Image (cartoon, rainbow, N blue to C red):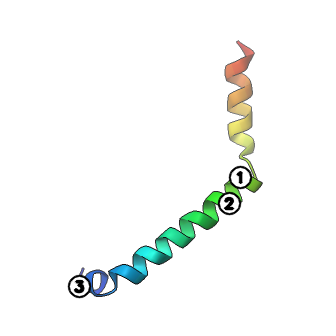
């Protein structure tokens, strides 16, 4: 925990960057499973 508190700003920045990259990738490559689940819900 001491390391985190000593480097909190840098760690939080890297987490935010990673989340932004993941979000961009999800928007470029939608989940095939989610598409199937959505289609199944709309099938009814």
Q: CA distance from mark 2 to mark 3?
A: 32 Å
Q: Quadrant of residue 2?
A: bottom left
Q: Residues within 10 Å of mark 1 (few under 14, many from 20)?
A: few
- Measured as percent of width and height from the top left, residue 23 is found at 62, 58
**SS type, badge 3:** helix
Q: Which residue is mark 2?
A: 24
Q: Which numbered disc, 3 or 1, marks the residue that appears first in the sequence?
A: 3
Disc ID at residue 12: none
Q: Which residue is mark 3?
A: 2
Q: CA distance from mark 3 to mark 1?
A: 36 Å
Judge left or right: residue 6 versus residue 24: left
Q: Which residue is mark 1?
A: 27
Which residue is painted at 68% across and 60% down in the image? 24
- Measured as percent of width and height from the top left, residue 5 is found at 26, 81
- Measured as percent of width and height from the top left, residue 30 is found at 73, 48
Q: Quadrant of residue 8?
A: bottom left
**Furthest-left residue in view?**
2
Which residue is painted at 71% across and 23% down in the image? 40
**SS type, badge 1:** helix
């Amino acid at each position: 925990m001491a390391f985190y508190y000593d480097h909190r700003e840098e760690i939080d920045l890297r987490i935010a960057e990673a989340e932004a990259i993941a979000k961009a990738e999800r928007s470029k490559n939608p989940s095939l499973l989610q598409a199937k689940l959505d289609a199944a819900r709309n099938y009814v």
